[in-house]
Image (spheres, rainbow, N blue to C red):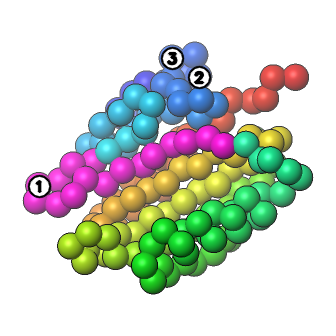
Amino acid sequence: MSTDPGQAAAHATAARIGRWIVPAIPFGWTWIPEFGIQKRSEGVVPSNVYLREDQLLAGDKLELYIQAQIALMKRTFMDPMIAGPAPIIFPDAAEAAMLMLKHKAMHQVTVFQVQHYVRSGKWIGIATLTTLESELLKIRPDFDQFMKLLRIEPELA
């Protein structure tokens, strides 16, 4: 894996979290094995991109999975503002969608999350950017770049 976005690693040398393939990370971010990436800035809570996986329990539609996630968010966060889901394109995925969530965390700080859900067969990959609302405009271009580099390992036949 390379920390230079212009120097992407081959799939064989790329970092992995489950079926997620991470060939490179944006400049200034740190790789955290089995988690994803993190960017620390002076005087603010770090921004994170957390990569995780899940499985569809029934059917083959991403929409039902996301609706269950939205219901969970509404129970977990006080007065969450949720936008989406909106369809997106992701290489080698059967379908993908983006969801945005804004909520107040401890100390009344506003937290913003951008979640990309990617489906391949029954596999669901979730990439979640978590940052302070005040940092979003600085962090979002790095997240978008990371998502363009990120790949999923094909299903074994």
Secondary structure type for disc 2: loop
What amino acid is labelled 1 in the image? Glu
Badge 2: few (under 14), some or many (20 or more) residues near its Cα, within 10 Å? some
Task: Give the label on residue 140, or none.
Answer: none
In this picture, residue 19 sits left or right of residue 113: right
Q: Are marks 3 and 2 in contact (CB under 8 Å)?
A: yes
The part of the image, by quadrant, that contains residue 87 is bottom right
At which x and y percent is residue 21? 57, 31
Q: For mark 1, what is the residue?
A: 42
Q: Eyeballing the image, is 123 above or below 127?
A: above
Magenta residue check for 52: yes
Q: For mark 2, what is the residue?
A: 11
Pick the front one: 5 or 101: 101
Badge 1: few (under 14), some or many (20 or more) residues near its Cα, within 10 Å? few
Q: Eyeballing the image, is 86 above or below 18?
A: below
Q: Earlier in the sequence, mark 3 or mark 1?
A: 3
Determine the residue located farthest toward the front in the rendered image: 75
Tell me which residue sits at (81%, 23%) in the image.
Answer: 156
Question: Label 3, label 1: how many angstroms apart (C-alpha)?
Answer: 32 Å
Determine the residue located farthest toward the left in the rendered image: 43
Q: Nearer the viewer, mark 1 or mark 2?
A: 1
Q: For mark 3, what is the residue?
A: 13
Q: Quadrant of the C terminus?
A: top right
Q: Earlier in the sequence, mark 1 or mark 2?
A: 2
Magenta highlight range? 39-54
Secondary structure type for disc 1: loop
